[in-house]
Image (cartoon, rainbow, N blue to C red):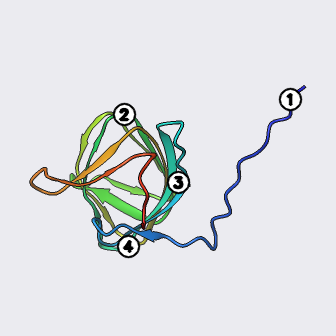
Amino acid sequence: MTVATNFMVPTENRPYLPIPELAGIGLKPMNMKDDTPIWSAVMRIEVGSCLPKRQHDELCEVFVVRGSGAFSNGTAFQRGDYVREEGGTFDKITAKSELVVFLTHHGKCRFLDDDGNTLLDMDHLTNVGA
């Protein structure tokens, strides 16, 4: 019989790594491994800051751990909500209070400016804060 081993990352004292291309946003990478395109992270968005437009190659699942925010169309979300973004392009998110989310991403996420230019490509091989 094989006994499985848990994968646990203590996060409380782990700092949010700044993302220079995304002002007011920090990331705690949780599971970014070379052998799988599925990756997880905790993201913090400062109050009033915006997560820019996002273009996903695949599914992105987000659980709101703390705070509240709104999509550009005015749809609001808060702590405990689940957001699912499948492959495609999604508009800005504004943090109404400090917003902390846990995300699991299947593949690449491209962050875009208002004109559709790439600010940052992020995937399981991205070295945040380097």
Q: Residue flagged by tag 4: what amino acid is it?
A: Glu
Q: Nearer the viewer, mark 3 or mark 4?
A: 4
Question: Closest to the observer: 101 or 106?
Answer: 106
Q: CA distance from mark 1 to mark 2?
A: 32 Å
User: Label 2's element?
Assistant: loop
Q: Residue flagged by tag 3: what amino acid is it?
A: Gly
Question: Is there a contact, CB below 8 Å, between mark 2 and mark 3?
Answer: no
Q: CA distance from mark 3 to mark 4?
A: 18 Å
- Tag 2 or tag 4, which sits nearer the N-term? 4
Residue 46 badge: 4
Query: What is the crowding at mark 2: few (fewer than 14 residues within 10 Å), some, or many (at least 20)?
Result: some
- Tag 2 or tag 1, which sits nearer the N-term? 1
- Residue appearing at x 68%, y 63% in the figure: 10
Q: CA distance from mark 1 to mark 4?
A: 44 Å
* Quadrant housing residue 4: top right
Query: What is the crowding at mark 3: few (fewer than 14 residues within 10 Å), some, or many (at least 20)?
Result: few
- Tag 4 or tag 1, which sits nearer the N-term? 1
User: Label 3's element?
Assistant: loop
Residue 2 badge: 1
Query: What is the crowding at mark 4: few (fewer than 14 residues within 10 Å), some, or many (at least 20)?
Result: many
Q: Which residue is mark 2?
A: 58
Question: Is there a contact, CB below 8 Å, between mark 1 and mark 2?
Answer: no
- Residue appearing at x 42%, y 67% in the figure: 129
Q: Is residue 30 left or right of residue 96?
A: right
Q: How many marks?
A: 4
The image quadrant where one finds the C terminus is bottom left
Residue farthest to the left, as pictured: 115
Q: CA distance from mark 4 to mark 2?
A: 26 Å
Residue 80 badge: 3
Residue farthest to the top, as pictured: 1
